[in-house]
Image: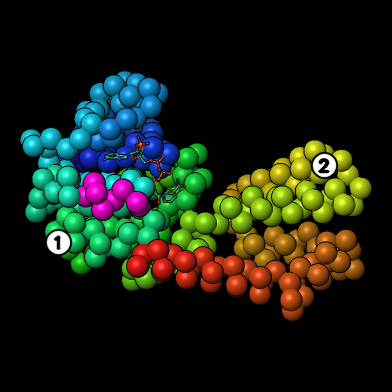
Amino acid sequence: MSYSAMGQVVLVGAGNMGGAMLTGWLKSGVPGSSITVIDPGPSEAMLKQIADAGACYTKEATADLRAGILFLALKPQVMGAVLPTLMSLVGPRTVVVSVAAGKTLAFMEQHLGAAAMVRAMPNTPAMIGRGITGAFANDAVSTEQRDIVHRLLKVSGPVEWLDNEDQINAVTAVSGSGPAYVFYLVECMAEAGRKAGLQADLAMRLARETVAGAGELLHQSPDAAAILRQNVTSPGGTTAAALSVLMADGGMQPLFDKAIEAARKRAEELAG
Ligand SMILES: NC(=O)c1ccc[n+]([C@@H]2O[C@H](COP(=O)([O-])OP(=O)(O)OC[C@H]3O[C@@H](n4cnc5c(N)ncnc54)[C@H](OP(=O)(O)O)[C@@H]3O)[C@@H](O)[C@H]2O)c1
């Protein structure tokens, strides 16, 4: 189904995530004329992007506006106050998509009424089109709606559809919060390098490029992570010496089990 046949794509919240999605949509060929952006105070750059694309802009929902796809990229803490102002945008053919962390479909239904809804969890590399998104659709979402939502989410990277909404909490713990774990890994490697005798800035450059380069290799290679690891581990060599520490009983796996579980539980608590 074409975007125009679906009705307007209404983006509510043109901040970091909403802005990244808008940029991706325009790059991937979604016509600007089929997009309306609602945000009370977007940046000058965002306003220019909206105008250049021929998209519509409004500070708040207007009485004449209906959404084919209502894409919510608001901060979770403002959702409760803003959703009631968006009720008039939702009709029988609207699909609502929310990327707000912790806000359940039940919460959205409470404020917008029963509708076709998708809850999605992207991550920050979406800003450069290299994210990954976990998404769950309720039973009211048609095949055509799911297909078009998939296309809209895919501009920021692959989309994984989930079997049940609770899995969003585990997705949040693994990939939603995941980039921060990788950035911390860089910090830890750099600090260990400094302790091993390198200047701090050199250790940071080495750690940063190693993680970025290994990530790119992982991205480009068809091999599993375990194979790529084995490929750089000669028996009795330096990598094997380090991995014997990282892969020991009290090493990285149990630490990650604990960290991911802490994040998953927190996501559950925030969903309230
Ligand atoms: N950033 C990420 O990596 C990431 C990852 C996964 C999920 N998410 C989710 O994405 C959502 C947005 O996050 P973000 O980082 O993009 O936040 P953000 O940069 O603060 O963007 C939110 C935007 O919504 C605007 N806004 C506030 N009130 C509004 C209203 N009444 N109507 C329309 N727009 C309104 C804000 O304007 P003002 O700035 O003027 O208030 C801002 O431009 C969050 O729910 C977050 O959980 C983000």
Callout 2 secondary element: helix
Q: Nearer the viewer, residue 25 or 97?
A: 97
Residue under the image location 25 percent in, 23 percent down: 54
**Which residue of the protein is positioned furthest toward the bottom in this rendering?**
249
Q: Position of residue 268 (x, y in %)?
A: 41, 69
Callout 1 secondary element: loop
Q: Position of residue 221 (x, y in %)?
A: 62, 53
Residue under the image location 43 percent in, 45 percent down: 156
Residue located beneath label 2 in the image? 200
Q: Is mark 2 within 8 Å of ligand 1?
A: no
Check disc 1 and give the amino acid type.
Answer: Ala
Q: Position of residue 24 (x, y in %)?
A: 39, 37
Name the magenta segment's main secondary structure.
helix
Magenta region: which residues? 76-83
Residue under the image location 29 percent in, 21 percent down: 51
Residue 210 in sight from this viewpoint: no
Q: Position of residue 3 (x, y in %)?
A: 21, 41
Residue located beneath label 1 in the image? 114
Q: Quadrant of ligand 1?
A: top left
Q: Residues within 10 Å of mark 2 (few under 14, many from 20)?
A: some
Q: Residues within 10 Å of mark 1 (few under 14, many from 20)?
A: some
Magenta segment includes 53: no
Q: Nearer the viewer, residue 69 or 257?
A: 257
